[in-house]
Amino acid sequence: MPPMLLPIIYLAFVSLGLPDGLLGASWPQMHVDLGAAVAMQGVISMIIAGGTIVSSLNTDRLIAKLGTGKLTLASVALTAIALFGFASSPTFVTTCLWAIPYGLGAGAVDAALNNFVATHYAARHMNWLHCSWGIGASAGPLVLGAVMLTSAGWRGGYLAIGLAQAVLVAVLVAALPLWKKARIAHEEGGATETRPVPKAELIRLPGAKYALVGFLCYCAIESSCGLWGSTFMVLDRGIDAATAATLVSLFYVGIALGRFVSGVLTLRMGGEALTRLGEALIAAGVVVLLVGQGMVPTAVGLLLIGLGCAPIYPQMIQLTPKRFGEGASQSMMGLQMACAYVGSTFFPPLTGLILDNIYAGALPWIVGCLVAVMAFCMMRVDRSTAVERS
C-alpha cells in the first residue's frame, strides 16, 4: 500500500467523528433559534440515522462503481455541504432536509473505510482508526462550544466544522492517485475480487445472523451509556448534573484510551481474544455499578465499561474478511454497519423509557443483558465460521 494512504484514512476518520457530537451539544441553543420543541432533536437524529443505514446497505454497489477513494471523497463532500446547510438553515423543516445528506455521507464512508482497513492493514490499525474517530468526536463539541461563546453562536460552530470538512475534501482530491495505486497493488497481489453480494445470500452465511445481532448489541451498549449515563447518575445516584456530565466523559476516555492500547495488544493477541477481554471488562464495570453506590464506584464502573467497549467494535470489523471471506466482506460490512446504526438509533429511546417509567437504576442491568447476548453471539460466530473454514 502507498505509505501516505494510511494517514489520509486516519484523517478521514477524524473527519467522520467531528460532526457526531454537534447536534446534542448545540441543541439547547439551536432549538430556540429554530423555534422547535426540545424533543424534536430526536426527529433530526432519526433522519440522520436513517441516511446512514441506507448508505451503509448500498456501500458495496457504490464502491463497485466509484471505488473506495472517490466514494470517500463524495461522502465527505456531502457531509460538508450538509454542515453548511445546518449553519444557514432558517427553520426546523429545512434542518431536517439537510439531515438527509448528513446521514448519507457518514454511513458510506464508515462502511467503506472500515472494510478497506480490514482487508489491507494489520489489526492494530483498525483500533487506531477508531481511536481517530474518538479524537474527532471529542474535538467537535469542543470547537462548537468555543464558537458558541462568541456572537457566531451555534451556526458559527457548524460553519467552522464544515470548513474543516471542506479542507479535508481538498486533501482527498489530492490523494485520489494514492487510491488508484492501492487498487493496482491489490490486484497485482492476486487478492480476491470484492463483489456486491445480495442481502439474502449474506444472511445465509455461517454465523452471519449472530454477527449482525452482535453489532446491534454493541452499539446499543455504547449509545445507551453515552446518552443516558448522566441521567442515570442524577436520578439513581443523586449526583448533581454538572458532576454527572463530567463523570460520563470517563466512559469516552475509556474508549479512546482503550483503543490506543488495543492497537498495541494486537501484536500479541488475536481479535477473538481481544473481543472476549472487552466483554469481560464490560461485565466487570456492570458489577462495580451494581455493587457500589457512591461517586467513585460509579466513575470506575463507567471507565471499565468504556475500556471494555474499546476493542470490541474494531475487532468485530477487522475479523469480517476472515469470518465471511474477502470477496463478500464489503457487502457484509455494509450490512453490519446498518445493524450497528439500528442499535444506536432505536435502543437508546427504549433505555430512556425504562429509566423514566420503570426503574432509574436500570442502566447497569440493561448493559449486563446486552453484553451477555453479545458474548453469546460472538461465541457462535467464531464457532460457525471456524467450522466453515475447516
Image (cartoon, grey):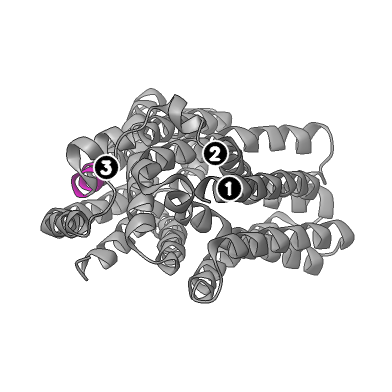
The amino acid type, in three-letter code, at marker 3 is Ser
Q: Earlier in the sequence, mark 2 or mark 1?
A: 2
The amino acid type, in three-letter code, at marker 2 is Pro
The circle on residue 3 is: none
Q: Where's residue 252, x and y in %?
A: 57, 61
Residue nearest the viewer, comparing 268 with 284: 268
Task: State the residue at coordinates (35%, 64%).
Answer: 121
Q: Nearer the viewer, mark 2 or mark 1?
A: 1
Q: Nearer the viewer, mark 3 or mark 1?
A: 1
Q: Earlier in the sequence, mark 3 or mark 1?
A: 3
Q: CA distance from mark 3 to mark 1?
A: 38 Å
* Residue under pointer 1: 387
Mark 2 and 1 residues: CB-CB less than 8 Å, in contact? Answer: yes
The circle on residue 75 is: 3
Q: CA distance from mark 2 to mark 1?
A: 9 Å
Q: CA distance from mark 2 to mark 3?
A: 32 Å
Q: Quadrant of residue 294?
A: bottom right
The part of the chain drawn in magenta is 69-74
For the residue carrying disc 2, how many other residues have a C-alpha within 10 Å: few (<14), some (14-19), or many (20+)?
Answer: many
Q: Is residue 388 above or below residue 4?
A: above
